Amino acid sequence: MSPAPALVAGLYWLIAAVVLGAAVLVMHVYATWRVVRSDVEPSWWKWIAVVPPVTPVAAWVAGQKKTAGAWVLLLAAYGVVRLIAG
């Protein structure tokens, strides 16, 4: 039996992880940009939004609930793919 199907499946998981990882990075930049451009008070939320674990919280406080939800959803999808792929 050829190891080719296992290699192809591994390649698909790798591609999925890379694409989701890139999407998480883009979403992080977008969420940070939305927080910085908002008029959230106190203004220190704008500075702390750069820290990745705090970004969705800062976006939520800034009123960007869909952005915060998408950030968390993409990160969860990336984590699931990484867990399944090994």
Image (spheres, helix red, strand yellow):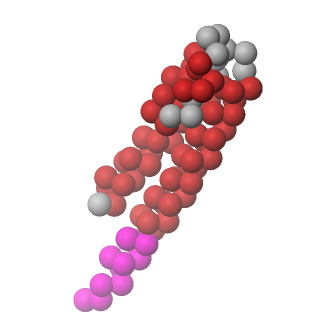
- Residue toward you, 53 or 4: 53
Is residue 7 shown to the viewer in this render?
Answer: yes
Q: Residue at x 63, y 24 (%)?
A: 46
Left or right? Give the position of 80 relative to 27: left
Tell me residue 23's x, y (percent). Answer: 58, 49
Tell me residue 26's x, y (percent). Answer: 62, 47
Determine if the magenta segment contains residue 79: no
Q: Residue at x 34, y 60 (%)?
A: 85
The stretch of residues the image draws in magenta is: 1-11
Q: Residue at x 61, y 11 (%)?
A: 42
Q: Residue furthest bottom?
A: 1
Q: Residue furthest left?
A: 1
Quarter placement of the C terminus: bottom left
- Residue toward you, 19 or 37: 37
Quarter placement of the N terminus: bottom left
Residue 26 lies, with reference to residue 46, above or below; the image says below
The quadrant in which residue 68 appears is top right
The quadrant in which residue 38 appears is top right
Residue 78 lies, with reference to residue 2, above or below; the image says above
Count of all numbered marks drawn on residues in the image: 0
Q: Main secondary structure of the magenta part?
A: helix
Determine if the magenta segment contains residue 3: yes
- Residue toward you, 73 or 4: 73
Residue 34 lies, with reference to residue 43, above or below; the image says below
Left or right? Give the position of 44 relative to 13: right
Is residue 68 shown to the viewer in this render?
Answer: no
Q: Residue at x 69, y 34 (%)?
A: 33
Tell me residue 58's x, y (percent). Answer: 56, 22
